[in-house]
Image (cartoon, rainbow, N blue to C red):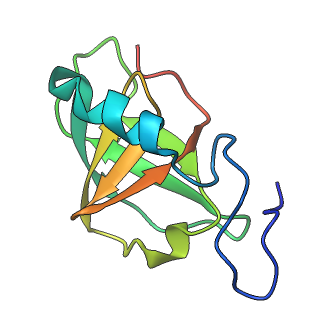
Amino acid sequence: MLCASTDGAACSAHGAGHALSAIHSRLASATPSKWRDGVAGVTTIDGWIPIELLETDAAVDHTVWVWNHNLDLVAPGEPVALHSVYTALAVGQARFNVLIAASLG
């Protein structure tokens, strides 16, 4: 999973795990009930971050793995919100388009 950007330029790819398009951001913002609160874990060597969801039922896995080439900006233990439909990750005011390895259900 490589980014199309070079020399620190902004990412020009809009696939999962790359740049968040304006429409993607608007869709996620328009569906606030689909955000799930969580806490970021330690990033793996290949860039995957476990998100420990705070509100889940017993039938749902509490950890969801996400990837974005910029997620090194997320500190372990940092509160985040993950959108269950539009695969967006909120870290403070910042929003990222993420690739999700496990379904949120």
* 39 lies left or right of 96: left
Question: As displayed, is residue 103 above or below residue 49?
Answer: above
Q: Nearer the viewer, residue 13 or 41?
A: 13
Answer whether residue 105 is visible to the viewer in this image: yes
Q: Nearer the viewer, residue 1 or 10?
A: 10
Q: Quadrant of residue 82?
A: top left
Image x and y of residue 98, in percent? 54, 46
The residue shown at (69%, 41%) is 15
Question: As displayed, is residue 75 above or below residue 92?
Answer: below
Quarter of the N terminus within the rendering: bottom right
The residue shown at (56%, 28%) is 102
The residue shown at (59%, 55%) is 19
Image x and y of residue 84, in percent? 37, 25
Q: Residue furthest front?
A: 22
Quarter of the C terminus within the rendering: top left
* 56 lies left or right of 95: left
The residue shown at (63%, 49%) is 17
* 97 lies left or right of 75: right
Image x and y of residue 2, in percent? 83, 61
Answer whether residue 83 is visible to the viewer in this image: no
